[in-house]
Structure formats: structure tokens, C-alpha cells
């Protein structure tokens, strides 16, 4: 029996039916979580939620059975977004842990478990190691006797979370704004479009099948990042002002406007920094992001007297820095945006979206107006599949060699970051960025050459432009 429990940058992730996402594996996860709470002298009370995947209901039940074996009480929220669950954990005085059943932006055959501490933040490495140890030494009898289920009555709900975000941002009306809202057939499907409509926006819901069999399938943030032109053309055909796009558990967001403009996390960080600065809320003039962030963002913020601080990829690294230094704003290019106030410590793109839409409506401006002074440097992301005869270990060296050739030819330094994806199994990422002296068109030619060379060696690769704004 496999006794290990691996964590990615964002919790447990894997294919359904493969250890640990089997019935016994999930029960062992529940037992390990219960043992961890008891060992840490924390209240044996947790909040549980899930996305719309067909497998989420089973995994939810199996983990809950494991929790019952350790007499852990649960507050069951059913289908909810990860930010919604995190918000309730953060603002509850009675729970020690949030458990979200989701594989976020991954395809339907995957699922996972995101774990949130009592502040709504990702767990520390120390907590993860303790849970892994408890999982390793957990044994389940053939026919375990479950404890008595204790589902607590509570006021937590998806709709309560939505209404509180609206109240906190002070947004009054979205009259006159027409939105297409892509919920990726996921958690946001039957709540967020209705909430925006109740604020007065004209809303066209997209991809909101409740059964979740098509979660993230040719829809949602990652699909639109891959194929921005297709989505931009669709938005233009529908004659809406903006396409609002979430992923399966709604902790990522991208925006496309009626001109075909594509706006990712870099753009949203710039807009939010501007809004918060104008409101006099930036006491510490710092924005936290990852090394993926476009250098043009750093340059634009610097012109406003705001410092950009980079950390490792992943929400938990940003959350840690926000908490320790009491910074206000963080986020990544992928659209996981954190506004760290008295009620939030984790990514909440819906909360960030309300701030942006309020600014657009109240000032009668466009998102293009709000990002006018953000000049992005030429940048692209190459995602490479490991499904080839070549070994994964060879790939970084091969890419380095070809980047050196680009440097030699262009006479302009290329900033690169390479990493294996921890949330999308089988993918290797390479981000390349040059200075504004080297146009994106030139960088695109180099990217295509790099792509061609990798394909000749048997790799499957795809290029995602990160700095082009209009498609």
C-alpha cells in the first residue's frame, strides 16, 4: 500500500481513482487531518466545500468519513468557490481548518484537496509535514466503524459570502455595463452571474453547467489564456463590454474587453494599486507578486512610488509575506489576486473584480483607460509536455542553449524562468522576457524558432503571449 501523501504548491492533486484519491486514500486523509488537529490542540471543527466535478461529491464523503473516525465536526457548504470557503474560514471563530475539494483549473479527470488554516491561508510546511506523517501511519480496518455525524448548523453560505463582498467594496450599481461571464462550468456558475445581474449589469452567463462534467473544458481562464483571440472574437460578436472569465473553483480571473483587449493579473494589480493608492489605503507602498510578473509592471508602479516585491510562484508564498509584513495587495499573472484587509488573506478574484467594476462604472472609464500607463515588456510563456522520448532532465539544458542563441542574435538580454508545473501534471514551463528595446514581434520570431527546435526533438509545446494586449 502506498503510504506517501504528496502536496503540490496548492494542496493535494491527482487523478480520481488513483491513490490517494481513492475511497481508502481519502478516508486516510480525513483521519490524518483529524489526528493533526488533535495533536495541535485545535478545535475538532472544520468547514468543507467542493467544486462541481462529479467526483467531488464522492471525495467529499470519503474525507468526511475519515474525519468522523476522529470525531471531527463539519460545517458543510456544498458547492462553493475556493475564495468563498477561505472567506468563511478566515471570518469564523469556531473552525480550525477549511477543506476544499477541487482541482482548480485542471480537467475533469483530476481532483484534489486544498487545505486552509484558521486564517483562511494555505498551510505552513510544518503543518503539511505533520499531516503527511499522520497519513503515512494511518491504517483503516476492513469495515471501519464511523463516529456519529455532527453537521453543525451555521450561517455560512455561498450567497452570504457574495453579499458580504458587495457590502465591503461599497459597490452600488453596475447599470449600463454589459458582461459575458464565463464560469468554466464550475463553482461560480449559479451565483456570481446572478450577483452581477442584481447589481444592474446586463449579464450573459457562459459555461455554467451544474453537473460539472465539462468543468474547464474549452472554457475558463486557462482556455482563454491559450486562445485569447477566439474568446475576444466571441465577446465582440455578443456586443458586450467585457468578458469576465473564472476557472473551475474561481480563484483565477482574466478579463477581455470589447476591443479584444486581454487583461491578466499584471493588469489587475496595476489597476488595483492605482485605486487603493488614490483611496489613501497604501500605507506600505508595496505590491507582492511572483517572478512571472512583467517587468513593465514594476516600472509602472515605480513611477507611482510603489515597490514591487517578487516571491516564489504560489499563493502560500504571497500569503506568508502579506501576513508577516502587513502588505495590502498581491497576486500573480494567472489572476489569483489578494486584497489583504481585515476580512481576507487569500486570493479572491471576485472581490478584486468588484473593485475594478466599481471604478469603471463610477468614473465612466474603461479598463483600457485604467491600464493606459502600464507598458508591458515583450514576454511569452512556453508550456512543454514531457510526453516524449527525451528525459525531463535534458529539457532545461536544451532550453538554456537556445536562449543563449537568442541572446547572441538579439544583443538584448532575455530574462527566463523555468519550472515544472505542480498544478498541471506533465507540463514544464519556460517564461521568456526581453526589454522594451526588443519588440514583441521580434521575440515572437525567436519563440517560434525555439518552439520548432523543441518539436523536432519530440516535445509538444505551446506558446502563450503574455504581453500582447489586443487580439
Image (cartoon, rainbow, N blue to C red):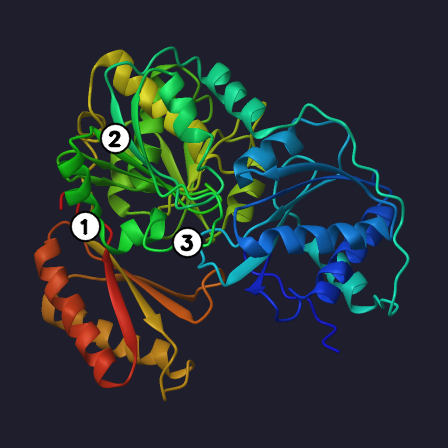
Left of 358 or right of it: where is 140? right
Callout 2 crowding tier (Cα within 10 Å): few <14, some 14–19, many ≥20: few
Q: Position of residue 186 (x, y in %)?
A: 46, 44
Q: Position of residue 136 (x, y in %)?
A: 78, 68
* Local secondary structure at mark 2: helix
Residue carrying label 1: 230
Quote the CA–CA distance across marks 1 and 3: 19 Å
Left of 93 or right of it: where is 328? left
* Local secondary structure at mark 1: helix
Label 2 or label 1, whichever comes before in sequence order = 1
Asked which quadrant contains residue 217, the reply is bottom left
Q: Nearer the viewer, mark 2 or mark 3?
A: 3
Q: Position of residue 91 (x, y in %)?
A: 66, 26
Quote the CA–CA distance across marks 2 and 3: 44 Å
Left of 422 or right of it: where is 152? right
Label 2 or label 3, whichever comes before in sequence order = 3
Residue carrying label 2: 303
Left of 471 or right of it: where is 96? right
Q: Which label was assigned to residue 214?
A: 3
Label 1 or label 3, whichever comes before in sequence order = 3
Q: Residue at 79% across / 53% down in the picture?
A: 65
Q: Residue at 20% across / 62% down in the picture?
A: 413
Quote the CA–CA distance across marks 2 and 1: 34 Å
Circles 1 and 3: CB atoms closer than 8 Å: no
Q: Residue at 86% across / 70% down in the picture?
A: 142
The answer to whether residue 207 is visible is yes
Figure check: 142 above or below 173: below
Amino acid at each position: 500500500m502506498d503510504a506517501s501523501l504528496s502536496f503540490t504548491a496548492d494542496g493535494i492533486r491527482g487523478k480520481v481513482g488513483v491513490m490517494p484519491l481513492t475511497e481508502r486514500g481519502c478516508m486516510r486523509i480525513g483521519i490524518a487531518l483529524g489526528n493533526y488537529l488533535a495533536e495541535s490542540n485545535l478545535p475538532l471543527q472544520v468547514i468543507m466545500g467542493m467544486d462541481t466535478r462529479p467526483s467531488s461529491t464522492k471525495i467529499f464523503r470519503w474525507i468526511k468519513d475519515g474525519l468522523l473516525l476522529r470525531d471531527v465536526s463539519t460545517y458543510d457548504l456544498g458547492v462553493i468557490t475556493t475564495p468563498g470557503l477561505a472567506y468563511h474560514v478566515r471570518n469564523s471563530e469556531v473552525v480550525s481548518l477549511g477543506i476544499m475539494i477541487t482541482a482548480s483549473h485542471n480537467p475533469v479527470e483530476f481532483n484534489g484537496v486544498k487545505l486552509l488554516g484558521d486564517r483562511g491561508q494555505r498551510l505552513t510546511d510544518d503543518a503539511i509535514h505533520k499531516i503527511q506523517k499522520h497519513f503515512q501511519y494511518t491504517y483503516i480496518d476492513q469495515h471501519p466503524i464511523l463516529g456519529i455525524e455532527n453537521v453543525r448548523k451555521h450561517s455560512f453560505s455561498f450567497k452570504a459570502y457574495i453579499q458580504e463582498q458587495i457590502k465591503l467594496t461599497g459597490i452600488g450599481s453596475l447599470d449600463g455595463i454589459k458582461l459575458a461571464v464565463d464560469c468554466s462550468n464550475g463553482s461560480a456558475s449559479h451565483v456570481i452571474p446572478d450577483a452581477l445581474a442584481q447589481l444592474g449589469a446586463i449579464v450573459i452567463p457562459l459555461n455554467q453547467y451544474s453537473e460539472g462534467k465539462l468543468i474547464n473544458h474549452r472554457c475558463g481562464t486557462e482556455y482563454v489564456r491559450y486562445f485569447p483571440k477566439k474568446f475576444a472574437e466571441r465577446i465582440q460578436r455578443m456586443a458586450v463590454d467585457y468578458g469576465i472569465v473564472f476557472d473551475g473553483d474561481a480563484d483565477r480571473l482574466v478579463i477581455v474587453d470589447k476591443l479584444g483587449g486581454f487583461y491578466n493579473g499584471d493588469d489587475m494589480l496595476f489597476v488595483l494599486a492605482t485605486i487603493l493608492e488614490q483611496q489613501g489605503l497604501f500605507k506600505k507602498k508595496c505590491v507582492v507578486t511572483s517572478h512571472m510578473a512583467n517587468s513593465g509592471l514594476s516600472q509602472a508602479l515605480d513611477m507611482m512610488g510603489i515597490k514591487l516585491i517578487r516571491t516564489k510562484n504560489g499563493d502560500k508564498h504571497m500569503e506568508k509575506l502579506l501576513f508577516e509584513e502587513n502588505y495590502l495587495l498581491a497576486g500573480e499573472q494567472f489572476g489569483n489576486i489578494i486584497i489583504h484587509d481585515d476580512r481576507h488573506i487569500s486570493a479572491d478574484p471576485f472581490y478584486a473584480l468588484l473593485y475594478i467594476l466599481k471604478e469603471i462604472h463610477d468614473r465612466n472609464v474603461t479598463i483600457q483607460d485604467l491600464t493606459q500607463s502600464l507598458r508591458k515588456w515583450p514576454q511569452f510563456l512556453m508550456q512543454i509536455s514531457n510526453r516524449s522520448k527525451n528525459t525531463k532532465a535534458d529539457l532545461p539544458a536544451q532550453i538554456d542553449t537556445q536562449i543563449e542563441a537568442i541572446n547572441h542574435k538579439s544583443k538584448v538580454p532575455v530574462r527566463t524562468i523555468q519550472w515544472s508545473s505542480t498544478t498541471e501534471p506533465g507540463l514544464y514551463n519556460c517564461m521568456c522576457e526581453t526589454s522594451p528595446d526588443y519588440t514583441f514581434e521580434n521575440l515572437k520570431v525567436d519563440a517560434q524558432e525555439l518552439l520548432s527546435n523543441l518539436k523536432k526533438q519530440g516535445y509538444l509545446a505551446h506558446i502563450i503571449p503574455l504581453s500582447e494586449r489586443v487580439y
